[in-house]
Image (cartoon, rainbow, N blue to C red):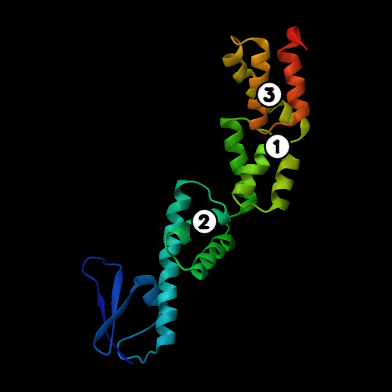
């Protein structure tokens, strides 16, 4: 088989149509075309065509990855999942995520720390909830434990719990004490705070109604 023509597409100026033996076979973007160094008159086989298509898909997937990251940080798993959902082949999705990792653009350790910064400012939560949320994003357990150990010691978690508790008590203050205690306990539990921290705050908030 021989490449008989390479034409710039009219509607998509960055893409080029590749003709083999007089018939259109596939298209490549400009960067992929120039890096591949193919020319009119070159011999080509199906194996080379497949490789060129994968290179072109990698370029598309990388561009899509950039667009996703421009909105917000992504974990490695999130980025790979979105690429697969978009329809890119698994090997291409994996290769693109590896490329972002090697470039230092995607880093699960940095992601976990930045995510924690944003979340704790917006809505305080305890270590158990943080563990759950980061595991849901498929962050490695070793990274999660490292981040939590450095960032969520007992004192820090207590301070966060007090912020969450103070805000919630503004809603519960008009409820009967026993109802307020039950609802506060459930709220703090859902926010992932340790049992002993919840118990201490319940005593402080309902010291006049123990029992």
Nearer the observer, disc 3 or disc 2? 3
Q: Residue at x 31, y 91 (%)?
A: 41
Element type at mark 2: helix
Residue 150 percent coordinates (x, y): 74, 41
Q: Are marks 3 and 1 in contact (CB under 8 Å)?
A: no
When asked about the image quadrant of residue 170, the answer is top right
Front-lying residue, 159 or 172:
172
First in sequence: mark 1 vs mark 2: 2
Q: Is residue 127 above or below residue 9?
A: above
Distance of label 1 from label 2 (alpha carbons): 25 Å
Q: Is residue 206 above or below residue 147?
A: above
Residue 71 percent coordinates (x, y): 45, 46
Q: Which mark is residue 127?
A: 1
Mark 1, Cα crowd under 10 Å, few <14 / some 14-19 / many 20+, is many
Residue 191 percent coordinates (x, y): 64, 31
Q: Residue at x 77, y 32 (%)?
A: 154
Residue designated by label 3: 185
First in sequence: mark 3 vs mark 1: 1
Front-lying residue, 81 or 33:
81
Residue 153 percent coordinates (x, y): 76, 35
Q: Which mark is residue 79?
A: 2
Number of numbered discs present?
3
State the quadrant of the N terminus: bottom left
């Amino acid at each position: 088989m021989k490449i008989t023509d390479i034409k710039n597409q009219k509607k998509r100026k960055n893409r080029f149509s590749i003709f083999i033996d007089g018939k259109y076979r596939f298209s490549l973007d400009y960067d992929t075309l120039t890096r591949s160094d193919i020319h009119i008159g070159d011999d080509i086989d199906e194996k080379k065509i497949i490789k060129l298509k994968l290179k072109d898909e990698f370029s598309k997937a990388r561009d899509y990855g950039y667009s996703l990251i421009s909105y917000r940080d992504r974990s490695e798993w999130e980025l790979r999942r979105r690429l697969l959902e978009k329809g890119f082949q698994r090997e291409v999705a994996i290769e693109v995520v590896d490329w972002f990792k090697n470039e230092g653009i995607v880093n699960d350790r940095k992601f976990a720390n930045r995510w924690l910064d944003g979340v704790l400012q917006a809505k305080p939560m305890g270590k158990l909830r943080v563990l759950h949320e980061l595991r849901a994003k498929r962050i490695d357990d070793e990274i999660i434990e490292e981040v939590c150990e450095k960032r969520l010691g007992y004192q820090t978690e207590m301070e966060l719990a007090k912020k969450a508790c103070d805000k919630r008590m503004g809603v519960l203050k008009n409820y009967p004490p026993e109802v307020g205690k039950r609802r506060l306990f459930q709220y703090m539990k859902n926010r992932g705070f340790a049992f002993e921290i919840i118990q201490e705050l319940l005593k402080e908030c309902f010291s006049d109604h123990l029992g």
